[in-house]
Amino acid sequence: MLDPLRRSFPGTEIHLLVKPAGKVLYKNDRRITMIHSFEFPWASREKKLLLGRIKILPLIKMVRKLRSLEFDIGIDTRGDIRSQILMAVLGCRIRAGYTNYLCSNVEIKGLLLSHNAGQMPQQHRCFINLAVLRVLGCEPAEPAFRPISPRKSKDISRPFRVLCHPGAGWVHKLWNADRWAVLIEEILQNFYAEVLVVGERNDLVLLEQIRSQVTGPVSFSLTSLEELVTLIQGTDLMICLDSGPMHIAAAYDVPLIALFGPGYKEIWKPFNFNSCLIEHQDRYPCAPCLQKRCILPNANCMDAITSEEVFENVLEMVPDIFRTKFFKDSKGPSTESPRQTKRGDIDC
């Protein structure tokens, strides 16, 4: 959205309001004038609706600060009544948005919008954002993928780096720890590869479950978002779920295998050239869903994804030169991983 805004409104200041953790994603973007952050309770993973979790004094301070900047335009790209209320409270003269929350069947009136894009059909998030811009008079071109930075050529003297991120923002998007373990073992047995499994503190139990079932040399780490971005940039293949890290990998055009369960794949699928999407939503009349609980907890859409089919896609995305048998035949580098963490600990 940033380039079309700058073209349509020359000399404009662009401010972002994000969660505190999201500031790192934009800190080097020169198109952005200022980044503001606040931890809204509805953006939390847990207990979203508890009003007691709202920090009233920091919220008032944040609102006063933003109101003092006298914004001309506010843009809501989520179809979220809370964002639209906030734009009105902040005094935005022009308020652009739409009226069905993330293209779902959750509808609002849009009475607080001065420029209303109406109800959006299901489409990729990039197209949703551009549709909101059009009601402001912007005429952005159709989005063409452009990686944040060019990828370097692979040094075949080093092992093929595989980054696994088993976390997700919703419990029904998670994949079983035993399947992660089987997949990782298959990768170690068949490739000259270095495997790193990462997550945040909320993922610690899941990482421990995976670690307890993996016998090969694998590194397990808890990372900050900034550290994760650096790791993603240096990896050769990322395997993850429908999550924010998936989109970071896509933005850097990192080869990517994404496992999708209940999410709206047409909205949230990765937007890059080197991605593979694995899902079985066609087997489930309840998918995609916005349910608070899974109606098929013992046989859900994530359980339909097997370790074997994920590994088949790994086979297609790892160059043949990194297959273990090629290194043995050519007397190439040792197939022992150059890095091995102590079992029993996860790096923090």
Image: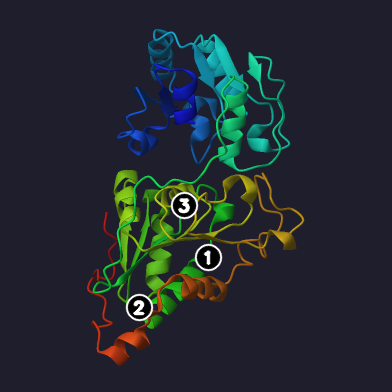
Q: Is residue 263 above or below residue 277?
A: above
Q: Of 60 and 3, which appears nearest the observer?
A: 3
Q: Is residue 99 above or below residue 249?
A: above
Residue 125 at x, y percent in the picture: 58, 40
Question: Considering the numbered disc 3 on the image, is that residue within a helix, a strand or a loop?
Answer: helix
Residue 190 at x, y percent in the picture: 40, 82
Residue 244 at x, y percent in the picture: 46, 46
Query: At 43% from the left edge and 50% from the top edge, which residue is drawn?
Result: 245
Does residue 78 appear anywhere in the picture?
no
Spatial separation of the CA atoms under disc 2 and disc 1: 27 Å
Give the mark toward the camera: 3 or 2.
2
Mark 2 or mark 1: which comes first in sequence?
Answer: 1
294 to the left or right of 60? right
Name the residue type under label 1.
Asn
Would you name the residue on which mark 2 appears?
Answer: 322
Would you name the residue on which mark 3 appears?
Answer: 246
Which of the 4 image quadrants contains residue 284? bottom right
Look at the image and name its color scheme.
Answer: rainbow
Name the residue type under label 2.
Phe
Name the residue type under label 3.
Met
Question: Considering the numbered disc 1 on the image, is that residue within a helix, a strand or a loop?
Answer: loop
Please tell me the numbered disc located at residue 176: 1
Mark 2 Cα-neighbour bin, 10 Å: few <14, some 14–19, many ≥20 = many
Spatial separation of the CA atoms under disc 3 and disc 2: 24 Å
Which image quadrant: the C terminus?
A: bottom left
Does residue 131 appear anywhere in the picture?
yes
